[in-house]
């Protein structure tokens, strides 16, 4: 009886009865579907940009160098999204629906600069025509809605600014959390070497180049595993190692302190020079501060490298210490620089602010007088007379500090890019050419001794990338064009560096496996993001915007645009609810609730990790 | 099978007959087989051909040819693949993978880029990891035990039709 039911059910599979055709059809569809899924997976992998390049680099140089390129690719993704936000929601609406160039004073090149506005030199410097365009803050009009869509431009500008920073925070933290999950896997699998030996060759390879890459990657993978093994086998004389490590840290601290003091001293000296008049001194004195900072940036990392050889760490951990120390060096230098300039900055800021306010009044007064002069001499008591048509290029302007700040950031980014590219070309490429071709006619073997081919400097490049991104975050509120420039820079940098690595660099002596999580880079990125948000938040909250340029002109503070929107665009009960919600009596318990839930989530995640480990042990 | 016969025939059209009803005794030498595009880049190509050949010298009759491709296809069961993989890596055909076999495998895999001490280290580690019965070399049981836990084995050891 049961047999009959069974046969009825599997009629088709047994090849008999009416179900046969349908079953065969079903099987064929399943096979086709699986094939389709496999092809789609292949397609998806092929779509990931630069995947083949990175795999090639990984097979020749190891996973730590490849991790830099993966990080670069990830940053490119983030910058694309930031670019999409700023371009789509800020630049395009203004370009399409805002008043065109030349209609308002803030949108026109002043008469005095008109002659040079289109010169290449002016454009390269981002003044002239480039300054008075959608690329910078000053161009935007403070009209509340523009175009037939009633697009609220100032609101959009503000929200995009806040949104870029918020999005960046979110994605960095999300990536850190994801990486923390991966890290729990651990790579102390059993049969590590056996699997590498017996299962790493891919029998499907038929192409000689792929085969070359595969051989290189197998060799590198073996070398990495050997390094891991050697590190775990090393016998440590604990006391000697600890003593050496303490000594190394002490030396590093001395170096940092020394460089900080040097910068302080040099800045003070330059202030003295400035007081006595710069003409008395030669080129060195004039550029002393810049030169000292650049020299420190060049030599201290090498010094740290030498110190780290005392410490005898696993190469991955040594890289982290190196990164941390160079980071501390740059931050320390910047900080001492700013402190040394603090008095000067305070003075200048106050001066600038008062100057701006004064100049505002002066310019406004001048404008009334000037308008009046167009009315033939009488200063009207109330300006009910219709405004006369004046060419916007002739109107006197107030200072527009936001655009100036934006311009500084853009110039800094461009010069930083140029410096990086030139360093790669000279430092790596020319050096490789020199070593290769002059080796025949030189006294000692250039390839083995000094200078030989250069290795890929992971820490320098990663830090450069992170600091560059910090500048972008700081500047994109004042110059919406910055993410676009950065996307272009990262794109070209990817190609240039991939080529330079494969062509001019040699793999490191001890190839080590990068930790699967890039959490260390992420942590530094988060820190820099936080640091670069602070100035922007400060300016939004406490400094009044320029009175005649930008989308917030005329308001007392930039965030007033939110208040304005709430009043005018939302129904009245919304405003009331908001008023109640911003009562401190509600906010404090809310904060308390958030802290408690954070603690709870932390505790649960810890317990999950422990359960995970227990299960893994049971599987063994 | 028909397609395989086509490939077999292509390699030496003057030798291979089209008609197998009379069960002729035709073998193709190793040189021809290892020049096939699927096998050309494989560092183990000689071993693969040797392990499927009946006479142990590397000449494949059509039956051996079909056997080889059927084991390398996706349809073959895991145990069968493990048996043949063991034969391939066993260079001196003593049914054990000893240290010399491991060294030869490693050299073929890395095209001799590793130094001698690195090679010794790796081979020692492999024996340490996989040798369960403690005889200093890998028997088939050890090999199978280790391979059955490997996630990548099936993926890399299969060829698509």
Image (cartoon, coloured by chain):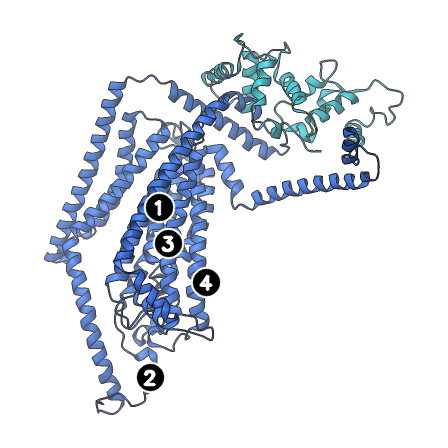
Classify A49 as above or below B7: below
Which SS class for mark 1? helix
**Does dot 4 land on a helix, a strand or a loop?**
helix
Query: Of callouts 2 and 3, which one flags the residue occurring earlier in the amino acid sequence?
Result: 3
Q: Which residue position holds label 2?
A: A390
Q: Which mark is residue A88?
A: 4
**Mark 2 vs mark 1: same chain?**
yes
Residue mark closest to the camera, 2 vs 1: 1
Colour in which the image shows chain A: blue
Marks 3 and 1 sit apart, C-alpha to C-alpha, by 17 Å
**Among the chains, which one is cyan?**
B
Q: Which residue is labeled 3 in the image?
A: A166
Q: Residue at x 31, y 18 (%)?
A: A236
Q: What residue is pinned by disc 1?
A: A466
Where's the N terminus of chain A, which quadrant? top right
- Name the N-terminal-most of marks 3 and 1: 3
């Amino acid at each position: 009886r049961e047999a009959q039911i069974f046969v009825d059910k599997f009629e088709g599979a047994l090849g008999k009865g009416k179900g046969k055709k349908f079953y065969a059809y079903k099987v064929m569809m399943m096979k086709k579907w699986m094939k389709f899924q496999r092809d789609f997976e292949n397609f998806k992998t092929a779509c990931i940009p630069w995947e083949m390049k990175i795999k090639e680099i990984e097979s020749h140089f190891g996973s730590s160098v490849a991790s830099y390129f993966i990080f670069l690719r990830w940053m490119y993704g983030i910058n694309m999204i930031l670019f999409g936000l700023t371009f789509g929601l800020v630049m395009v609406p203004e370009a399409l629906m805002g008043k065109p160039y030349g209609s308002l004073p803030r949108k026109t090149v002043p008469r005095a600069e008109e002659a040079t506005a289109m010169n290449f030199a002016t454009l390269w410097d981002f003044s002239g025509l480039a300054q008075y365009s959608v690329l910078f803050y000053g161009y935007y009009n403070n009209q509340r809605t523009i175009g037939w869509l009633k697009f609220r431009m100032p609101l959009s500008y503000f929200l995009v600014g806040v949104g870029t920073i918020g999005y960046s925070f979110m994605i960095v933290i999300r990536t850190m959390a994801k990486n923390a999950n991966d890290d729990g896997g651990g790579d102390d699998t059993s049969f590590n070497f056996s699997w590498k030996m017996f299962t790493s060759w891919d029998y499907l390879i038929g192409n000689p180049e792929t085969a070359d890459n595969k051989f290189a990657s197998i060799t590198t993978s073996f070398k990495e595993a050997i390094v891991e093994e050697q590190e775990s086998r090393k016998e440590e004389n604990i006391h000697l190692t600890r003593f050496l490590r303490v000594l190394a840290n002490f030396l590093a601290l001395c170096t940092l302190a020394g460089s900080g003091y040097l910068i302080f001293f040099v800045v003070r000296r330059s202030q003295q020079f400035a007081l006595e008049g710069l003409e008395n001194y030669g080129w060195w004195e004039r550029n002393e501060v810049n030169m000292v900072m650049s020299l420190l940036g060049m030599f201290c990392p090498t010094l740290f490298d030498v110190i780290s050889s005392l410490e005898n760490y696993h190469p991955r951990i040594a890289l982290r210490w190196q990164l941390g120390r160079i980071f501390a060096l740059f931050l320390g230098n910047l900080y001492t620089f700013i402190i040394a300039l603090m008095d000067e900055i305070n003075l200048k800021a106050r001066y600038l602010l008062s100057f701006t306010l004064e100049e505002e009044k002066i310019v406004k007064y001048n404008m009334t007088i000037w308008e009046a002069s167009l009315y033939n001499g009488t200063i009207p008591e109330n300006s009910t007379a219709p405004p006369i048509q004046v060419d916007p290029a002739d109107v006197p302007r107030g200072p527009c500090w936001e655009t100036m700040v934006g311009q500084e950031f853009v110039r800094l980014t461009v010069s930083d890019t140029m410096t990086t590219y030139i360093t790669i070309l000279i430092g790596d490429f020319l050096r490789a050419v020199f070593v290769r071709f002059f080796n025949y006619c030189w006294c000692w073997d250039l390839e083995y001794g000094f200078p030989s081919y250069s290795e890929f400097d992971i820490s320098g490049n990663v830090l450069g990338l992170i600091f560059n991104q910090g500048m972008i975050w700081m500047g994109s509120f004042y110059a919406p064009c910055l993410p676009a420039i950065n996307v272009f820079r990262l794109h070209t940098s990817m190609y240039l560096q991939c080529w330079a690595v494969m062509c001019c660099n040699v793999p490191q002596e001890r190839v080590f496996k990068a930790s699967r999580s890039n959490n260390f880079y992420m942590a530094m990125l988060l820190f820099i993001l936080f640091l670069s948000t602070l100035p922007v938040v400060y300016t939004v909250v406490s400094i009044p915007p320029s009175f005649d340029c930008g989308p917030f002109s005329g308001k007392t503070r930039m965030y007033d645009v939110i208040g304005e929107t709430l009043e005018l665009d939302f129904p009245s009960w919304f405003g009331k609810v908001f008023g109640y919600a911003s009562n401190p009596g509600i906010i404090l318990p809310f904060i308390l609730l958030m802290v408690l839930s954070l603690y709870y989530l932390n505790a649960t995640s810890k317990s999950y990790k422990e359960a995970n480990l227990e299960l893994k042990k049971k599987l063994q | 099978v028909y397609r395989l016969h086509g490939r077999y025939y292509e390699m030496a059209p003057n030798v291979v007959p089209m008609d197998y009803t009379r069960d002729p005794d035709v073998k193709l030498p190793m040189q021809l087989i290892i020049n096939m595009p699927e096998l050309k880049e494989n560092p183990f190509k000689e071993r693969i051909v040797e392990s499927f050949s009946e006479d142990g010298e590397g000449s494949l009759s059509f039956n051996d040819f079909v056997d080889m491709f059927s084991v390398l296809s996706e349809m073959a069961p895991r145990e069968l693949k493990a048996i043949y993989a063991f034969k391939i890596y066993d260079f001196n055909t003593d049914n054990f993978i000893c240290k010399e076999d491991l060294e030869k495998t490693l050299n073929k895999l890395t095209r001799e880029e590793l130094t001698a001490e690195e090679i010794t280290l790796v081979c020692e580690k492999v024996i340490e990891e996989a040798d369960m019965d403690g005889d200093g070399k890998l028997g088939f049981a050890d090999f199978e035990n280790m391979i059955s836990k490997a996630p990548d084995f099936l993926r890399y050891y299969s060829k698509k039709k």
